[in-house]
Amino acid sequence: MDRLTRRIVGVHVGDRTERSAQALWDSIPAQYQTSAPVYTDFWSAYARIIPAHRHYPSAKSQGETNHIERFNGTLRQRISRLVRKSLAFSKNQENHLGALWNFIHHYNATMCV
């Protein structure tokens, strides 16, 4: 997420493996990879994938990741199929991905500053 515009600039849906971290990094446009600071939690895969001069691990209490954490909460609130106990929950991963991409495109087009 770009902290100034609040636009989602890179996405990967997967587990918390180094491969997923690499896929997330690869989804970020080159202009961000070469010039933007990247604030993350302390997940060790990030440290192995993101170049050290761009990577800034941050505790939640520091507030550097609060925008993306808030966005994650918004996803859970607005896309009911992401919440297991909802009536809209689907076991089909394609349906989850479709709903997620639809939300992200709508969010970037209409909800950003």
Image (cartoon, rainbow, N blue to C red):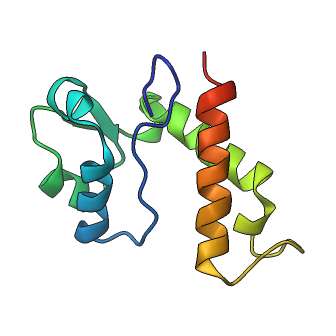
Q: Residue at x 32, y 54 (%)?
A: 24
- 4 versus 57 height, above or below: above
Q: Position of residue 10 (x, y in %)?
A: 39, 44
Looking at the image, which is closer to me, 21 or 94?
94
- 113 versus 46 height, above or below: above
Tell me: 36 left or right of 106: left
Tell me: 66 left or right of 45: right
Q: Quadrant of the N terminus?
A: top left
Q: Residue at x 60, y 15 (%)?
A: 113
Q: Residue at x 46, y 64 (%)?
A: 13
Looking at the image, which is closer to me, 112 or 48?
112
Q: Position of residue 52 (x, y in %)?
A: 10, 40
- 17 versus 45 height, above or below: below
State how many labels appear.
0
Query: Which quadrant holds residue 58?
Result: top left
Q: Position of residue 47 (x, y in %)?
A: 17, 52
- 72 versus 64 height, above or below: below
Outermost right residue: 87
Query: Which quadrant holds residue 69?
Result: top right
Q: Position of residue 103 (x, y in %)?
A: 67, 47
Tell me: 76 left or right of 45: right
Q: Residue at x 78, y 75 (%)?
A: 89
Tell me: 19 left or right of 85: left
